[in-house]
Image (spheres, grey):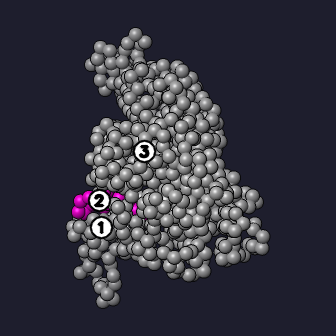
Amino acid sequence: MIEGVNARMIRGMDTRYLEQLVDDRPADGVFRVHADVYASSELFELEQKHVFERTWIFLGLESQLPRPNDYLVTWIGRLPVLVTHAADGVRRAFLNVCRHKGTLLCRLESGNSRFHVCPYHGWAYDATGRAVDIKDQASGGYAEAFSGDDHNLVPLGAFAAYKGLLFGSVSADVPPLEDFLGDLKFFLDLAMEQGPQGMEFVPGRIGFTYNGNWKAQLDNSSDAYHLTSTHVSFMEVQRRRADLVSGHQEARQFDWKKRFEQEGGAYTFRNGHNAIWLNQSESSKRPIFSQIAEVRDRVGELKAEWMLRLRNLTVFPSMQIADSTSLLIRTFRPVAVDRTEMRYYCLAPIGEAADVRAWRLRQFEDFFNVSGFATPDDTTMYEDMAVGLKASQIGFVQGYSRGIAVQVSGADALARAAGVAPVSSAHGMFDLQAETWGHALYREWARLMRTGAAGDPAWAHAVGGPR
Amino acid sequence: MIPSAHAVIATRVLQREAALLDERRWDEWIALFAADCEYWVPTWRTEAELTTDPQRELSHIYYASRAGLEDRLVRIRSGRSPATTPLRRTAHCVSNIELTGAGETHLEVRSTFANHVFDPHHRTQIVLFGWSEHRLEYGSAGWLIARRKIVLQNDQLPAMIDIYCL
């Protein structure tokens, strides 16, 4: 237990408790996060309300709904969400819930339908969310008051797209999407501008559930520090593939030894986002490399060069893009404090050449799949963290300390050259393996939890201004 | 009519594959596969549709040769993969073995599997189930697996699966 905190404060989620969970003292070079943040089921309940239902959440790609009447079903935290593409060409997002009795409305993951009819009592909605049929309404003996009620689907508070990425928010009290994303947009562009005709999810998807807290995944995508311990067996496989020219050559993964001689770094951005990068000595081992001349002409030299670097980014709280072997979009959904549902998609340029697409798939499956060589070792660590973090007695975990002494406030030279203004930059050789990316995540987590518990609006602060 | 000798061969190869995985006799297991075998576990693209083209769509595992399976053994034996240590214990149950085609030197076989997997570390257990399509080919090394396609029916997976779970 944190000093001065009593059981009543935890139960009541007194802001004095919440304020102490993230020990953020830049002047002292300290950034620590308390074990309870990952392990407390009381905090988990509050996260659903204060974090997931009060900020922008990634819902899918525009290219998943190309035709009128296409729809897809997804989640914001524990709330079911329906995204539609109506005949008027407008995409919209709603709570995927029938107004009659609150039944889940649309039961398939995706499809094409002019109407969405609730299987329970047959209420029907069109793709604009309008209730077009209350079954047997005329004979229903409804009072006058009923026709005064709004029977339409409940739209999300906010819904917007950036570069083909669809985001929604349950709360209407959010800044415009582009303000929310801020300068992370540069890194989103590096993923979403790779194809001349846009980007799509390759058909097929990977879904799995791990018995651990969602923040284990939130962290791990940015964590370069674990590679040389968690993934040594994959490095051994890679070494054998390179030295003996044996094994799964179709994946054409790059030489990991060379990775460790590269420069890299971590950026933090406003509103919880971060990005890490690493130079790449073997650009030719990137699926996009064969198209790089076209890419360079279209997006310019600077962005093309950045596309060849290894980059992982996190849009707080639950979407990540990893472009570390091939290109991945990962979303995760907290189901319980120690249970998280994952969904992985392979992102690729629309119209990609068949041989490049096949290679992209082999790299993706090799590294990212839960039946692959990297992810299962990560998820096993997340499950072991869930076991260990029940020991609240350890107090604060120490995993956000690397790089504090070398990080600079604002942009480093590389970011300045790209016209990007991060909150902080840390830059060094691979073995720096900075952990400063975590500061963005947990400052935002603490801010949303604190304002939520206090009953204050989440986004009252000027989005463009200092925190 | 398909000669019963073919059914006996198919049953023997499939049951041996299962037993060798359960008993972790990796070298004997991999020796059941032809060097140029195809090993494919497609993903589901929706609730009802499987992916059909591993060159254009995402698979759980796709290997165009035995070399990919050899990597798996390197990892299992490394002792340095947290997901693989301690190794999960398995019981592969193969049933409904049905000959779907036969020639002079090849057999096509469909079978159903329900593989029980116990994780002694987290003390959890799961069942992975579905069906397999095997193509067996006869050559100088006897009957070998030239192709195995595995349709995994329960595809919301646990935090890891590997070839010995399939």
Badge 2 is on which residue? A65
Q: Which residues are magenta?
A: A57-73
Badge 1 is on which residue? A91
Mark 3 or mark 2, earlier in chain: 2
Disc 1 marks a residue whose amino acid type is Arg
Residue in front for this viewpoint, A448 or A153: A448
Q: Nearer the viewer, mark 3 or mark 2?
A: 3
Q: Nearer the viewer, mark 3 or mark 1?
A: 3
**Res. B24 visible in picture:** yes
Mark 3 or mark 1, earlier in chain: 1
* Residue located at (50% from left, 46% from top): A279
What element does badge 3 sit on? Answer: loop
Instruction: Say if mark 1 contacts mark 2, CB within 8 Å.
Output: yes
- For the C terminus of chain A, the image quarter is bottom right
**Disc assigned to residue A341:** none
Badge 3 is on which residue? A326
* Residue located at (57% from left, 41% from top): A260
The location of residue A184, given as percent across then percent down, is: 46, 62
Mark 1 or mark 2, earlier in chain: 2
